[in-house]
Amino acid sequence: MNEKLQWLRNKMNSLSMQGMILTNPINIKYLTNIEAEGTLLLTRKENIYITDGRYIEQVHSILTLFDEIIVYDQNDISKDDYENFFLFCENVGFEEYHVSYATYKEMIRKYKINDLVETDHMIEKQRMIKDQEEISNISKACNITDNCFHYLLGFIKPGMTEKQIAKEIDDYYNERAEGPSFETIVASGENSSKPHAVPSDRKIQKQDIITIDMGCKVNGYCSDMTRTIFVGSVPDEVKPVYDLVLKNERQTMQDYKDGASTRILTKMVENDFKLHGYDLIHSLGHGVGLEIHEPPYISYRNDVQLKENMVVTDEPGIYLPGKFGVRIEDTVQISKFGCSSLTNAERGYVVI
Amino acid sequence: MNEKLQWLRNKMNSLSMQGMILTNPINIKYLTNIEAEGTLLLTRKENIYITDGRYIEQVHSILTLFDEIIVYDQNDISKDDYENFFLFCENVGFEEYHVSYATYKEMIRKYKINDLVETDHMIEKQRMIKDQEEISNISKACNITDNCFHYLLGFIKPGMTEKQIAKEIDDYYNERAEGPSFETIVASGENSSKPHAVPSDRKIQKQDIITIDMGCKVNGYCSDMTRTIFVGSVPDEVKPVYDLVLKNERQTMQDYKDGASTRILTKMVENDFKLHGYDLIHSLGHGVGLEIHEPPYISYRNDVQLKENMVVTDEPGIYLPGKFGVRIEDTVQISKFGCSSLTNAERGYVVI
């Protein structure tokens, strides 16, 4: 059996869980590499994937004997089959954060399960720790992102619109990776003061500040990087803000390591910002993997300890409404005694 | 109050429902035009929208006095406020198909509600019947789709890849509308035999068949159209299949009207296909609106009656694995005694 399914089987054993119904496509991709709609059943003796007839070929082409997964066309499964999958099973897990209340009731009826039990993000928690292959995929996505940023420095010219630049980034990612991992942000001038700005028809001007938040996907795994750059020169009013954001981004990277508390990490940046008269209005970072935003969330609201081989962002930002904003973000891999950044584009002043 | 919220209030009254918690963003957009993350509460006396501080301005810019919706920042709402929203309410509705089992439990705890009740797609069912403004938006999206198809006939040349053509369609939609309403399908040669093909690097050849499934969005509302076209000439082996699909697409358009049964409509196409040795392997159509696929689903599995001002697709297709496929699809508006197609690109043989 593949390692991830074997891990899940062991975890289920340790919880005396006799079966599991998995429907979250991200968790299914994580466990099996399957990307076709369907349901993964872990019954007492078998791993079963139930899918639509249209996807049978595609699923078979991904699986190997080693996966030990039996594939069924949902049209070939009778009412009795459903009831037999978990016959005499006492403790069948389901993904209560993914399954709607209506589907929960339908599962109980269809599989005739008496004790469908919550699994409390069991797989999402495991997904926080990346293995070698996952880190290799994220690294590749990060390299392509560094290269794209480098390419942009020669591409961006005054007169271009934010939308044009965003489209160039998306095209770059579509050609060299599986496309962007989220909606690319290109926010110039006063637009940069909105952390979630959408690229507009605003044209880049001769003395502009531009925040670019970008990332792509490789084998389903994401990268995430933000740089704030300048056209012509760095305005005097921006320098102290940029310096403060960069100082905190670097300090956080010093502090990220196995065992560090997400709450304390965030509080440190918040306090340094406050000391200078600014606020940290969003979280300091988030996990990156098959999803662009996934646990752990690095904010004062959430106190978890970072662990070796988590991959998270480090992204402090300061936003002065109607004026400008500065955010600097890297995707980093946590290690035993520190961390290493997987994105590595220039972090100091970049003037084009 | 706006008409759609007033309709919902009346509906709730008729069901003795004293409150409602809405979280499905599509339903919220439908009822209020708001497109920012948040929760819509219909309490005994007020309509309340709870959102993230970042979206407050955006929400206010969309709403008018006429909407009678009070907007709150979620950070300003206390534990007591939550418990007071539905104080003494006996029957509070929620969207059981959208709310996860975990959120359902959290809602009961947070709002202190004893009887959170299922609403059985109450709003989705209403959304099936479009008003004048909705039909106008869909019509605009359909016109842009017709024009895009017409543009493509001059654009497509042998040697181009499926991906290049799909990108041209997406660019067209990004410039003239709110982008594509789903992942554009361009499937050529043997790829056309896969109903859900993803555009590949396959190059268009001199005697090719190409299936193009395309649509865009206007004010959030979708269009959906498929045409199967030919390079050079129509191969003899394809003609009888194309003719059979087109005959059934036209016949279905004759039969679509207020009161028609989705099951019988589908059975008629299925039977005519079987008579000629083919199968209908997907549904005959689906509703189109704020979502590209929404109720009613037109298949033999689902027996509902079409109603005036539903907007649905008519999309029979035949697929010969490894050889070729033909699908012809239009978006049509149901009327009292018939229907009218909102997409109108040429349906006969198109040879480029």
Image (cartoon, coloured by chain):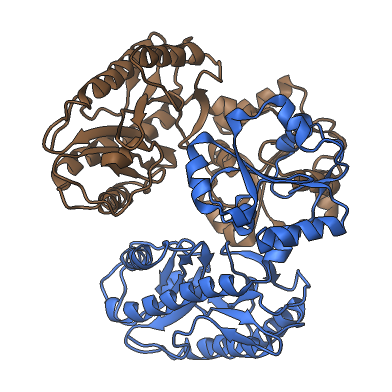
Chain colours: A brown, B blue
Q: Looking at the picture, how far across and down is residue B348, in whole percent?
A: 46, 91
Q: Residue at x 42, y 62 (%)?
A: B178
Residue drawn at (20%, 43%) of the image: A152
Image-based side of A301 in relation to A312, left or right: right
Marks counted in the figure total 0
Q: Position of residue B43 (x, y in %)?
A: 76, 44
Q: Is residue A262 left or right of residue A207?
A: right
Location of the C terminus of chain B by quadrant is bottom left
Name of the residue lying farthest toward the front: B65
User: Where, by quadrant of the figure, is residue A53 drawn?
Assistant: bottom right
- Answer whether residue A44 is visible to the viewer in this image: no
Q: Is residue B292 left or right of residue B43?
A: left
Identify which residue, A103 or B62, lies in the foreground.
B62
**Toward which corner of the image does residue B295 lie, by quadrant?**
bottom right
- Give the residue at x 86% y 44%: A112
Q: Position of residue B22 (x, y in %)?
A: 69, 47
Q: Position of residue B219 (x, y in %)?
A: 49, 63
Quadrant in the picture for the N terminus of chain B: bottom right
The residue at 40%/66% (across/down) is: B177
Residue B190: tell me if it is visible: yes
Examine the rendered structure and indicate whether residue A201 appears above or below residue B235: above
Q: Nearer the viewer, residue A144 or B47?
A: B47
Q: Is residue A278 left or right of residue B64?
A: left
Towards the viewer: B14 or A309: B14
Which image quadrant is residue B132 in? bottom right
Placement of B208 over or under A242, stated as above or below: below
